[in-house]
Amino acid sequence: MQFRIKNWIFTPTLVGVITLIICIPLFIKLGFWQYGKAQRQLVVQAAYQTAKISQALDLPLHLESYEPLKYKKVAVTGHYETKYQLLLDNQVEDERAGFHVITPFKIDGSTQYVLVDRGWILGNDTHTDLPSVSTSTSKLEVVGQVWVPSTKIFTLEAKRVPNVDKSQLAAWQPVWQNMDMEQYKQSVPITIIPVIIRLDTTSTAGGFVRNWQIPTDRITTNLGYAYQWFGFAIASIAIFLYMSIKKQDSHSQ
């Protein structure tokens, strides 16, 4: 196959055409995939910032799905119970390792509980020596933003066996590597609303260090990858044209 325009000859190879047909749609698809991820993160960030300055809603106790409550600011009254409190490991603040303290909160006038992330505390020099956590048992109002833990968790921890008599469960293990809500619900003999309230930074309801943030570096990274894939598509076209177009010497005509 050959096309001529004045002294220029376009002679694409079959391999080049096939490669271009495969690569261009693939690179564009990957670019839009990364761009879409960045846009979804921007929507989450906007929802998070809006919720921070919004009026707190009463926490609903019975919903089929709590996803619509994600990042909303909610308020609930009750008291902390520390028997099934957990320390979420590998949490870093100012380059120091520690834990997030997540405490069950008994909701007033209900048999239900909700988990409250009270913030970050510093770990001890010896990792197995757990820090002490002071907790009020008085009636409190908890105000904070709703976090719905991800169900996509990679962990090397042994899974607790579901659907067993909870009275026969092993002794409570207070340190967890991941916040696995389903595993938590299977591990405790209390009724848990499947969300976590991240205690508001202005709350006096027994909180610790609470620098809640939505990571913006992923937005920048996703946009960078998107532009990179689009660049690959443009570069592929440029290389294809460079390899396929040749100028014919006028003396050879």
Image: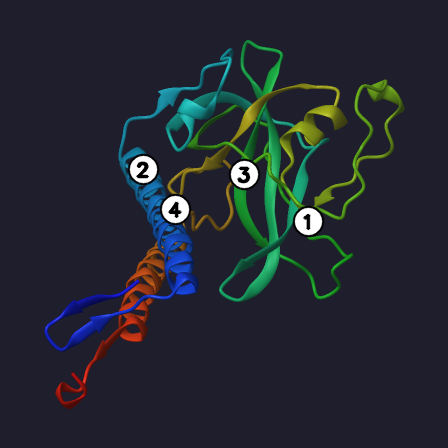
Q: Residue 117, which numbered label? A: 3
Mark 4 or mark 2, which has the lower sequence index? 4
**What residue lies at 78% left-to-right and 40% top-to-bottom?**
173
Marks 4,3: beta carbons within 8 A: no
Helix, strand, or loop for circle 4?
helix
Mark 4 or mark 3, which has the lower sequence index? 4
**Image height of 243 relative to 50, above or below:** below
Q: Give the amino acid type for the residue marked by disc 1 in the picture.
A: Ser
Question: Tag 4: Cα neighbours inside 10 Å, few (<14), some, or many (≥20)?
Answer: some
Give the residue pinned by disc 1. Answer: 132
Q: Give the amino acid type for the residue marked by disc 4 in the picture.
A: Trp
Q: Residue 33, which numbered label? A: 4
In the image: residue 247, left or right of residue 27 = left
Give the residue pinned by disc 2. Answer: 52
**Image height of 29 relative to 241, above or below:** above
Is residue 217 in view?
A: no
In the image: residue 17, left or right of residue 103 = left
Marks 2,1: beta carbons within 8 A: no
Marks 4,2: beta carbons within 8 A: no
Q: CA distance from mark 1 to mark 4?
A: 45 Å
Q: CA distance from mark 4 to mark 2?
A: 29 Å
